[in-house]
Image (cartoon, rainbow, N blue to C red):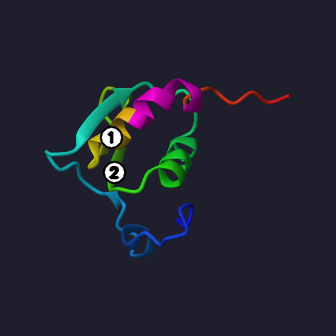
């Protein structure tokens, strides 16, 4: 929340994660390879705008971002984020 030394009003009022996907959000659909918590943690730490995350009927994950640049940023890092955890 204070990564850039300025408070994010959406985060303060717990308004970043949306319960529905507005039509102007940029959507990405992918197969989940890690825990949903890992995806949420990355989104909260590396983006500032509102987003939507849910599991679709076919079992894929759908993530959508209000700020389209953040959708691109997420898509670029998805292969790094969406790795199964290795326990040794």
User: Can residue 52 be seen from the camera position used here?
Assistant: yes
Residue bounds of the magenta highlight: 73-81
* Left or right of 5 in this view: 84: right
Count residues near mark 2 (Cα–Cα under 10 Å), then give few for <14, some for 14-19, many for 20+.
many
Q: Earlier in the sequence, mark 2 or mark 1?
A: 2
- Tell me how far mark 2 sits from mark 1, CA to CA: 12 Å
Q: Which mark is residue 5?
A: none
Most extreme residue toward the front is: 5
In this view, the mark in front (2 or 1): 1
* Left or right of 80 in this view: 57: left
- Measured along the vertical axis of the image, is residue 33 above or below residue 69? above
Give the percent coordinates (x, y) of residue 75. 41, 29
- Measured along the vertical axis of the image, is residue 33 above or below residue 68? above
* Left or right of 13 in this view: 4: right
Characterize the magenta stretch by its predominant secondary structure.
helix
Q: Quadrant of the C terminus?
A: top right
Does the magenta portion include 77? yes
Give the percent coordinates (x, y) of residue 54. 36, 43
Give the percent coordinates (x, y) of residue 72. 36, 33
Kindly identify the residue that appears in the image at 35 percent across and 56 percent down: 49
4 or 44, nearer to the observer: 4
Mark 1 highlights which residue?
69
Q: Secondary structure at mark 2?
A: strand
Quarter-wise, where is residue 12 in the image? bottom left
- Measured along the vertical axis of the image, is residue 39 above or below residue 5? above
Mark 2 highlights which residue?
51
Most extreme residue toward the right is: 88
Most extreme residue toward the left is: 23
Give the percent coordinates (x, y) of residue 29. 33, 28
């Amino acid at each position: 929340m204070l990564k850039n030394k300025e408070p994010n009003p959406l985060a303060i009022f717990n308004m970043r994660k949306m319960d529905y996907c507005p039509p102007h959000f940029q959507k990405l659909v992918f197969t989940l390879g890690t825990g949903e918590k890992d995806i949420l943690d990355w989104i909260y730490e590396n983006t500032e705008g509102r987003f939507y995350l849910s599991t679709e009927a076919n079992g894929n994950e759908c993530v959508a971002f209000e700020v389209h640049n953040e959708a691109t940023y997420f898509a670029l890092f998805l292969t790094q984020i969406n790795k199964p955890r290795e326990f040794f």
